[in-house]
Amino acid sequence: MPPGSGRAGATAAHTQLPLPVGMCLEAVTADQMDKARAGLERLVQ
């Protein structure tokens, strides 16, 4: 993933961890963000 992309801040926190662990954490946080966004959109409608 190139630096300066939108998720650079999210990935930076995981750089010290082994790659599979960092990828797993990032996938979990991305999934939670998607669910939160869907929930907010449901509330707005």
Image: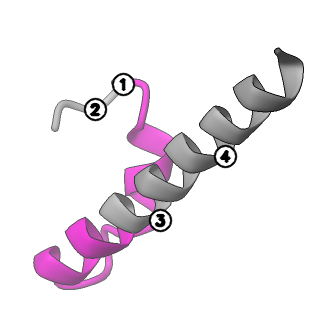
Mark 3–mark 2 distance (CA, rounded to whole Å): 13 Å
Contact check, label 4 and label 1, Cβ < 8 Å: no
Mark 1–mark 2 distance (CA, rounded to whole Å): 4 Å
Q: Which residue is mark 2?
A: 3
Precedes in sequence: disc 4 or disc 1: 1
Tag nearer the camera, 4 or 2? 4
Precedes in sequence: disc 4 or disc 3: 3
SS at circle 4: helix
| Numbered tag placed on residue 12 in the rendering | none
Q: Which residue is mark 3?
A: 13
Above/below status of 24 relative to 32:
below
Which residues are drawn in magenta?
6-25
SS at circle 1: loop
Q: Which residue is mark 1?
A: 4
SS at circle 3: loop
Mark 4–mark 1 distance (CA, rounded to whole Å): 24 Å
- Please state which amino acid type lies under the numbered disc 1: Gly
- Please state which amino acid type lies under the numbered disc 2: Pro
Decide which of 15, 31 is in the foreground and name it.
Answer: 31
* Mark 4 surroundings within 10 Å by alpha-carbon count, few (fewer than 14), some (14 through 19), many (20 or more): few
Position of residue 18 in the picture relative to residue 4 (left or right): left
The image quadrant where one finds the C terminus is: top right
Mark 3–mark 1 distance (CA, rounded to whole Å): 14 Å
Q: Residue at x 37, y 54 (%)?
A: 11
Q: Which residue is mark 4?
A: 36
